[in-house]
Image: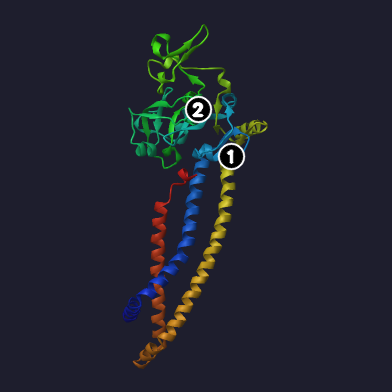
Amino acid sequence: MRGVLLLSWKHLCFHRARSLILIASIAVSFFLPLLTRALVERYQTVLRSRAKESPLVAGAKGNRFDLTLATLYFRDSELETIPFSEYEKIRDAGFGVAIPLNLRFKARGYPIVACGAEYFEKRGLGCDRGHLPFRIGQCVLGATVAEDLDLGPGDYLFSDQPELYDITKPPALKMSVLGTLARSGGPDDGAVFVGIKTAWILEGIAHGHRGDEEIDPKLILSEDDNNVAISAAMVEHNEVTDENIASFHYHGSTEGLPLSSVLVFPRDEKSRTLVKARLNASRLYQMVVPTDVVEDLLSFVFKIKALLDLVAAILAATTLLLIVLVLMLSLKMRAREIEALNRIGCSRFRVLQLYAVEIAILVAASAALAAAAMMLTLSFLPDLTRAL
């Protein structure tokens, strides 16, 4: 058998170009279905695990896919807002833990997640440096954000202005970084977390005023009995400090303050049913079950996978025909070689062994190449939680 292996190997090495072409062709037919299966399994695991950690999501009526993906993965979406009063109703009903979320802003391109303090407990998030924010104007960074921006406790991070040239919008907020979260492997690693009230500063609903004694007279453009017009040069950035925090306040009632959604963790199955029924009875709001939404989303993925599997099957069949053609041509070209082997005493079985071993070597090399290519591809693919 060692002689058969040696002869087969030497023959493949002698016809190097042909062997490499066959290995590449067979590897592609292995690679596509393997990669498709690996991607689908990875993505469905990620989607389902995050959905299971989020029992219910409340938000404005609209696209339930947008609502779910925005709440779970902080995906950009033009969600209608839900008033703070709806969150208070869910919370006060006593069906479980309700967590308000505002996801309308960014900082250096990363989503700002304004949330209640319970969010960190429910998600199992903790700080590896510093501590969680406890007042307006403070933030804590996900592990990826801290690494990419090279920021940590004691640094500052400015929010992005949604409309740069609109002077009616509030200026960028200078947020003090109190800590960085331990890496969780999920979308929380790529977010900036603040208290829910900080989002209302970003909305322009809450702000602070300086006292008259702090204003440089040169910055007063005009004044009368009722109004004072101040130059925009007075405010280069908005920052909450120990000295001015007492001046921050809201205009109007807090009941109408905007939220993107509300995460709900019901106590039991009865509470889950009741809170869903109450909110879904409304014309303006909806309560969705993320696991159901994700399963509907995955059903589309499986349809695409079936199409890709069909393409892979056609490719595999084409490759098989190519290999058969090459082997038939090879048999004709090696007729004199086979005749010589027969004359020196090789049986037909030995000749068949030579061909079988050559094919086995080609298939093994192709499988190894396909596996290496798949692992390399998976390692360089972007994280689904950031791609959504």
- Left of 245 or right of it: where is 278? right
- Left of 256 or right of it: where is 357? left
> Which residue corresponds to the image point at 41% horizontal and 56% vertical from the top-left?
377
Q: Where residue 4 sits in the image (x, y, percent)?
A: 34, 81
Q: Where residue 85 sits in the image (x, y, percent)?
A: 59, 23
Scheme of colours in the image? rainbow
Q: Residues within 10 Å of mark 1 (few under 14, many from 20)?
A: some
Q: Which mark is residue 166?
A: 2
Q: Which mark is residue 214?
A: none
State whether residue 3 is above or below residue 304: below
- Left of 308 or right of it: where is 218? left
The foreground one among 163 and 149 is: 163
Q: Is residue 53 visible to the viewer in this orientation of the structure?
A: no
User: Would you name the residue on which mark 1 appears?
Assistant: 289
Q: Amino acid at mark 2?
A: Asp
Q: Secondary structure at mark 2?
A: loop
Spot the residue most to the bottom: 343
State whether residue 249 is above or below residue 173: above
Q: Residues within 10 Å of mark 2 (few under 14, many from 20)?
A: few
Sequence-earlier tag: 1 or 2: 2
> Which residue corresponds to the image point at 49% horizontal and 31% vertical from the top-left?
163
Q: Where residue 235 sits in the image (x, y, percent)?
A: 41, 20
The foreground one among 354 and 147 is: 147
Q: Amino acid at mark 1?
A: Val
- Look at the image and tell me in which quarter the N terminus lies: bottom left
Q: Indicate which label's residue lies in the foreground, 1 or 2.
A: 2
Q: Dividing the picture into quarters, in which one does residue 96 lie?
A: top right
Q: How many marks?
A: 2
State whether residue 197 is above or below residue 50: above
What is the CA distance from the residue labelled 1 to the residue labelled 2?
38 Å
> Which residue corresponds to the image point at 39% horizontal and 77% vertical from the top-left?
358
